[in-house]
Image (cartoon, coloured by chain):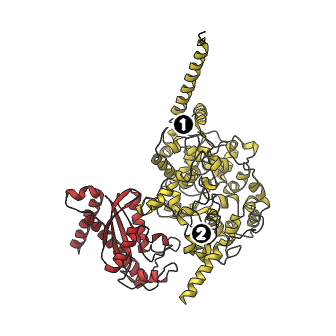
Chain colours: A red, B yellow
């Protein structure tokens, strides 16, 4: 177990280190933009899955000792997994990191999280069909990006119960394992 | 004929040019003086390119407070904005944080409205275009990103974009009292809550839990008048001793030296340097968050900026003549030995403030609660003084993880836009709908709320209707 944790930590550290080196390092030591994006996403996805399963799903849905709520401060509740992910993305942006990521969907609760660029629209459609990541390049605000869109699947009952019940959700029939949206990750080229 | 050159005029021109250049140089040079004198302030005033907004006018002569030098970059200015305002924006869960606009997916919007900088919407020194809350954009700026709102919210169809930020609907930054579920949760309460009162003050009760409280030097046990430890170090008459002995300081074991001797010397009073007139720095020892609020608010912001203390004479609001030149510090409102919080809650305010809202207080329903509390008919926490609304009692978490009541001394923080007061203050006693309506009624605010609001903001009705529709759809 300890070995596994150490291995995970090493992987995370490597991913973060690579993130700092960004595109410049990609050619030098054989890491492609895709490799960097995949590494970053694996950390994001794992952290959020751990939070969703071990914290939110366990304490809210299984043990029923505390609720998770969109208004977690006012409701004295747990932060929703999607919020935990967004707050992380905001903190990364505040630190001035060179890359950015966000969670988007064809069926967003907050309409600001619908696809905004052509690549986002195409990416969401592609991942819903193939359930596999979608990679491409795009130019936004005069800057060229390597953009990856990863399928975001329902990994716990907490995901679908919340999205199916929310009054702002366009869908109420999500099922476990289904692609609910996508993580869009951009590396400046 | 050759034109005649008048050397005297050229000499005068040269002298005047040199004098002007020297003055401009001296003014720019004075900007870096951290403790400016009268000459520095006069020179700086000549550099002001225009009148500043209500929020900044007191510190407009602390140029470096915003500009960080004579020719700052946009990022330098942004860092200065954030040094004062970032904490409040974070606490208010800013609905439009900077990170939203640095995300490349919003590049198109950021190109239309670069909201990564405060100065995009809040330009200073532009009185002609400055609106409420220091906004210098046309009031319909929401349209830039939310022009399709009626598609998502059909109830908003036909609403003018100039009305988005009307009280009770939306704010750009702070929507903690206006988000939809909050409106629904607080619907249905009328004028008053079931138990209308504010938090009780509780510093005395949590002293032992506070790591930075000097309870070993000044154990919280009552002190009698003859226990005063100043001896002959300070000139003090019997009246001063009597005032102190009757104060909550004496009741809590706070002796003369606690305020009159610097913290580092409090263990050796015989050799200590006694201070005749301690300032806010002495109060910080036990009342740190209160002083921090004072320095962030309209009463203390000049001190924080290194300028001479604010005086009523320099205020833009109407003030009484007899205290025009009193420099504002903690003792301006609290007195120097009585430290009577009740006196500070109304009497101190009206000793300076002379605007219509202040004058109307004494005939208001709020003032009647103070009389009722004095007669013992209602709890002291149900009495509404000036301080109840303008220096609200908030739940404050200390670095020691103690939650205590903090009387927030940043008294301008909940004023602009007025709806900020709804959640922080009004909701303690009133229903949210009543508070939203009252705060949206500008003449009622000016008259200090003598009657029920005459306007109705339909935000709660709309949120409830939408909730009902969603539930009906589920069933």
Query: Which residue is painted at 24% across and 56% down in the image?
Result: A25
**Secondary structure beneath label 1:** loop
Residue B444 position by quadrant: bottom right
Query: Which residue is painted at 51% across and 64% down in the image?
Result: B93
Residue A84 position by quadrant: bottom left
* Marked residue nearer the N-terminal end (2 or 1): 1
Q: B144 left or right of A97?
A: right
Quadrant location of the N terminus of chain B in the rendered image: top right
**Which numbered disc covers residue B315?**
none
The image shows residue B130 at horizontal and vertical percentages of 63, 51
- Judging depth in this view, the residue of B68 and B276 nearest the camera is B68
- Judging depth in this view, the residue of A104 and B260 nearest the camera is A104
The image shows residue B418 at horizontal and vertical percentages of 65, 61
The residue at the far top in this view is B1
User: What count of labels does the image hold?
Assistant: 2
Vertically, is B14 above or below B107?
above
**Which numbered disc covers residue B178?**
2
Question: For the residue carrying disc 2, how many other residues have a C-alpha within 10 Å: few (<14), some (14-19), or many (20+)?
Answer: many
Evaluate whether residue B173 shows in this view.
no
**Secondary structure beneath label 2:** loop
Tag 1 subunit = B
Vertically, is B193 above or below B296?
below
The image shows residue B359 at horizontal and vertical percentages of 77, 55
Quadrant location of the C terminus of chain B in the rendered image: bottom right
Tag 2 subunit = B
- Judging depth in this view, the residue of A13 and A58 nearest the camera is A13
The residue at the far front in this view is B1
The residue at the far right in this view is B363
Gap between marks 2 and 1 measured at Cα? 42 Å
Q: A50 left or right of B9?
A: left
Q: Which residue is labeled 1 in the image?
A: B35
């Amino acid at each position: 177990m300890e070995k596994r944790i150490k291995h995970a930590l090493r992987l995370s550290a490597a991913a973060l280190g690579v993130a700092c080196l960004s595109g410049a390092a990609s050619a030098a030591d054989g890491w492609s933009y895709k490799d960097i994006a995949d590494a970053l996403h694996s950390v994001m996805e794992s952290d959020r899955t751990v939070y969703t399963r071990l914290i939110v799903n366990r304490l809210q849905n299984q043990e029923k000792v505390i609720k998770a709520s969109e208004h977690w401060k006012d409701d004295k509740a747990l932060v929703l997994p999607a919020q935990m992910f967004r707050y992380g993305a905001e903190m990364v942006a505040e630190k001035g990191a060179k890359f950015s990521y966000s969670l988007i969907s064809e069926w967003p609760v907050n309409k600001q999280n619908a696809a905004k660029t052509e690549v986002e629209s195409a990416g969401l459609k592609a991942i819903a069909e193939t359930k596999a990541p979608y990679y491409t390049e795009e130019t936004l605000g005069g800057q060229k990006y390597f953009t990856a869109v990863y399928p975001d699947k329902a990994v716990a009952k907490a995901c679908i119960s919340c999205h199916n019940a929310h009054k702002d959700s366009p869908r109420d029939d999500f099922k476990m394992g289904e692609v609910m949206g996508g993580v869009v990750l951009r590396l400046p080229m | 004929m050759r034109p005649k050159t008048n050397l005297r005029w050229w000499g005068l021109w040269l002298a005047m040019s040199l004098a002007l250049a020297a003055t401009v140089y001296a003014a720019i040079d004075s900007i870096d003086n951290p403790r400016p004198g009268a000459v520095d302030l006069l020179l700086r005033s000549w550099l002001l390119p225009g009148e500043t907004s209500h929020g900044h006018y007191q510190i407009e002569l602390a140029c470096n407070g915003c500009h960080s030098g004579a020719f700052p970059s946009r990022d330098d200015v942004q860092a200065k904005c954030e040094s004062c305002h970032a904490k409040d924006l974070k606490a208010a869960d800013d609905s439009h944080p900077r990170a939203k606009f640095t995300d490349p997916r919003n590049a198109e919007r950021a190109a239309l409205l670069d909201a990564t900088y405060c100065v995009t919407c809040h330009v200073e020194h532009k009185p002609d275009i400055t609106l409420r809350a220091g906004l210098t954009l046309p009031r319909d700026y929401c349209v830039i990103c939310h022009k399709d709102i009626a598609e998502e919210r059909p109830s908003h169809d036909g609403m003018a974009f100039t009305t988005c930020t009307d009280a009770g609907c939306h704010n750009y930054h702070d929507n903690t009292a206006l988000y939809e579920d909050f409106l629904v949760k607080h619907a249905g309460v009328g004028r008053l809550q079931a138990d209308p009162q504010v938090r009780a003050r509780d510093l005395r009760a949590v002293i032992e839990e506070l790591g930075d409280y000097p309870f070993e030097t000044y154990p919280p046990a009552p002190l009698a008048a003859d226990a005063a430890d100043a001896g002959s170090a300070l000139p003090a008459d019997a009246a001063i001793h009597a005032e102190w002995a009757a104060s909550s300081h004496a009741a809590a074991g706070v002796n003369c030296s606690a305020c009159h001797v610097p913290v580092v010397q409090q263990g050796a009073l015989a050799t200590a340097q006694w201070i005749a007139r301690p300032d806010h720095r002495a109060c910080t020892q036990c009342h740190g968050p209160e002083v921090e609020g004072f320095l962030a608010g309209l009463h203390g912001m000049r001190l924080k900026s290194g300028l001479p203390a604010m005086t009523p004479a320099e205020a833009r609001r109407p003030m009484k003549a007899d205290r025009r030149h009193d420099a504002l510090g903690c003792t301006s409102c609290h007195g120097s030995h009585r430290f009577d919080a009740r006196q500070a809650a109304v009497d101190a305010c009206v000793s300076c403030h002379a605007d219509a809202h202040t004058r109307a207080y004494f005939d208001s329903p709020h003032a009647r609660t103070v009389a009722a509390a004095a007669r013992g008919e209602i709890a002291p926490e149900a009495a509404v003084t000036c301080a109840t609304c303008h220096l609200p009692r908030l739940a404050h978490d200390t670095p020691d993880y103690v939650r205590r009541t903090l009387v927030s001394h940043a008294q301008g923080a909940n004023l602009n836009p007025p709806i900020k007061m709804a959640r922080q203050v009004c909701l303690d006693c009133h229903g949210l709908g009543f508070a939203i309506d009252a705060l949206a009624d500008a003449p009622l605010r000016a008259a200090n709320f003598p009657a029920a609001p005459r306007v109705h903001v339909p935000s709660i009705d709309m949120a409830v209707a939408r909730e009902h529709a969603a539930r009906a759809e589920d069933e």
